[in-house]
Amino acid sequence: MSVKDKLQTMDYDPAFESRAAADAWLDGHKRRFGHFIGGKWLKPAKAQMLPSFAPATGEVLAEISVGTHAEVTAAVKAARAAEKDWAKTSGHKRAAYLRALARLIEKHAGVLAVLEALDNGKPIRETTNVDIPASVQHFDHHAGWAELIETEFPGHEPVGVAGQIVPWNFPLLMVAWKVAPALAAGNTVVLKPAEFTSLTALYFAELVMAAGLPDGVVNIVTGPGETGALLVEADVDKIAFTGSTEVGKLIRRRIAGTGKHLTLELGGKSPFIVFDDADLDAAADGLADAIWFNQGESCCAGSRLLVQEGIAERFLEKVKVRMAAIRIGHSLDKTVDMGAIVDPVQLERIKRMVAEGTADGAKVWHAPCGLPEDGCYYPPTLVTGAGTANILMQEEVFGPVLSVLTFRTQKEAVALANNSRYGLAASVWSETVSRALEVTAALKAGAVWVNGASMFDASVGFGGMRESGFGREGGREGMTAYLVPKAERKLKDLKADAAPAGSSNAKDIDAAVEATSGAQAAWASKAAAERGTALRRIAETLDARADEFVRKLEATGSGRKAAKAEVETTIRRLFTAAALADKFEGVVHTAPLRGVAFAMNEPFGVLGIACPPEASLLAPVTLAAHALAAGNATVLVPGAALVADLKGLFAGLPVSIVTGDPAASALLLARHGMVDALWSFAGDGAVQEAAAADNMKRTWMGMAKAWDWENGTLTSGKALMERATEVKNIWVPWGDQN
Ligand code: NDP
């Protein structure tokens, strides 16, 4: 082709990145990898090896070892052996190690970018511009937290040994998301990368050695899901998991009742909402980024387009133009926009879901982009005409498939957006600030982007609501997920409760949940100060009737002094919760953005509370008051003693007080699909927690510990408000092109 022809077509020739350095590294290991345990490479297992493919071509890049019980145990033992010294290492020194890791990733960026592109199938352009620099940023950011840990998190200590299980969509970046905060907080880790994409994690092991980290602080065990399951069962103090909701639920059931800490970053079906007053060209560009970036293999992919009816046709035309221009090809070709799907298994899954959606009435349009003849490729795809229950509207495809629905009104848009079991991310496009922000507040999602998509920064927490999991990664919230208050570690065990198991009426629980859930939205939308006033009134009422309540407590067996103290503390707790209602505020992040990213503390919705047998006035009132202050409605099961009195105190507020055995009621609440969170200090926490996995309820289980209601360090104030809320991070860019 002549230069003149070229100028006419303006077409790109392939421009391949060199893979020489990556191949040299793989060859250096004879393309066979053992596990990285205690600062050393184990010899590759003889029998059990798994091939790691390049999905662009099917070429076997290397073989990885399958971690068995013996290796997982050895890795946890190594992490345990390193735990004490690492936790004692000063924050300043840990920060130096994290910075060293950041510099080493930077230094090896070229080879890491190639290795990632080869192993995952994603374009080299993305690994170079996103995966690797974002990994560097994560280590640098968390070096900062390590530096500040003594002053920013006083009274806290590391959780201990963290088992970390990561997926294949952003392999190295997920390593950074998991390892950086864990190390900054003083934990040691055992990491299991995804079986499809372990190579950059193994390269990272060498950087860990080069940085001089003490042996055993970072351990890496490769293998399939079974290896991950072994890690979940092992003697770790925390599991941090990113992956499918299905496996997340499995893990939660497995560790229920063990006291292991857990954070889950799970799937999503994120709405991308375009109003008729949006900048349609910007929205179409944003959409292309939201769904076709990383081949759609992203947990926060904007995979559900909700577009206002009047502009739908025009907008879809713009989208199709962009789709048709997407270049698909080999991951090392610098000119491609989309690479290969990670593995034939995932490609089959995408095809199966699209076929099922089509059989259920959806119409499918594939962009006319050329696909390479070999390898694992799927074209950018648009799905229209699917009903709200269609699998392509409800389930995460994890491929380049966009499903479209139209809406007429803002109310309908919000209802459609929230019609999902997931709640990870959302985008809202409108040039009208009041509309965009109102919708933002109404969405059930952990991250919401206004006039943008997929904005991330290590300083801004990321994580889901509902079945998209719980816990945040990044920022202060991400650090707290790797720390535990020292006071919590010192809690004593409760004396075994010899009382026979009681019963609870499922119909009573149903009625209570229904009543409170109907009242929650109105309660949460009241001004925070108004919620505070309502709680203050209860405090004043109790103050006025203090003597009467002292007598009631005496009648339940309390001594006079203890009864008086309990009433006084209860009044104080009510005033505290009332005060916090409008003082437990969010934060404004200083993310690198021309605009603002802010974190809002949001209530869960309906919070079930099964009270402990002790502190029969103080515990239920404290718990309910803080739950209410945060904007939740509550179903409170206080035990027999003061039911009528508590009903009187909370009259007129969204609190249903249920008689019945707290332990039996807690199990009913754990199983209830309309209960969003559960605090339970009664009965078998393991059984309740396992039951709560069904709709990914947020739980706080008493775990037969004496929570010290009198002292209140862990059971009132900010500590309790944090337990009563989850964070929504909202990104609002500003300015325009002019
Ligand atoms: P999984 O949830 O199975 O995998 C995530 C990680 O968990 C991998 O390291 C995996 O190992 C490991 N794992 C698998 N089973 C277990 C188990 N029982 N106990 C402990 N760890 C386990 O996701 P898939 O890779 O199978 O992908 C399936 C679907 O999940 C995707 O199509 C997508 O919808 C969703 N997904 C969501 C992600 C997100 O970021 N939210 C990321 C990845 C997938 P191994 O890889 O060896 O199987």
Image: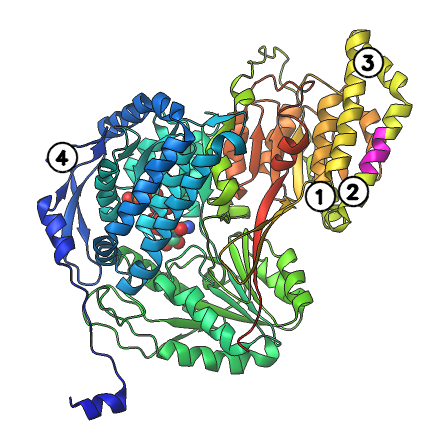
Q: Are marks 1 and 2 in contact (CB under 8 Å)?
A: yes
**Cβ of mark 1 under 8 A from ligand 1:** no
Q: Quadrant of the N terminus?
A: bottom left
Instruction: Look at the numbered discs 4 and 2 and tell me whether their residues touch, using CB distance below 8 Å.
Output: no
Residue type at mark 3: give it: Lys
- Could you tell me which secondary element the residue under label 4 belongs to? loop
**Tag count:** 4
Q: CA distance from mark 3 to mark 4?
A: 67 Å
Q: Give me the disc on residue 631.
A: 1
Q: Which residue is mark 3?
A: 564
Residues at discs 4 and 1 in contact (Cβ within 8 Å): no
* Mark 3 neighbour density, 10 Å: few (under 14) some (14–19) many (20 or more): some
- Sequence-wise, the earlier of marks 3 and 1 is 3
Q: Residue furthest right?
A: 544
Label located before the other in sequence (4 or 1): 4
Distance from label 1 to label 2 (Cα)?
A: 8 Å
Q: Magenta stretch: dominant SS?
A: helix
**Mark toward the start of the polypeptide (3 vs 4):** 4
* Residue pointed to by mark 4: 45
Q: Is the C-beta separation of discs 3 and 1 under 8 Å?
A: no
Cα separation between marks 3 and 2: 27 Å
Q: Viewer-proximal residue, 348 or 187?
A: 187
How many residues crowd mark 1 within 10 Å: few (<14), some (14–19), many (20+)? many
* Residue 664 lies in quadrant: top right
| Between discs 1 and 2, the one toward the N terminus | 2
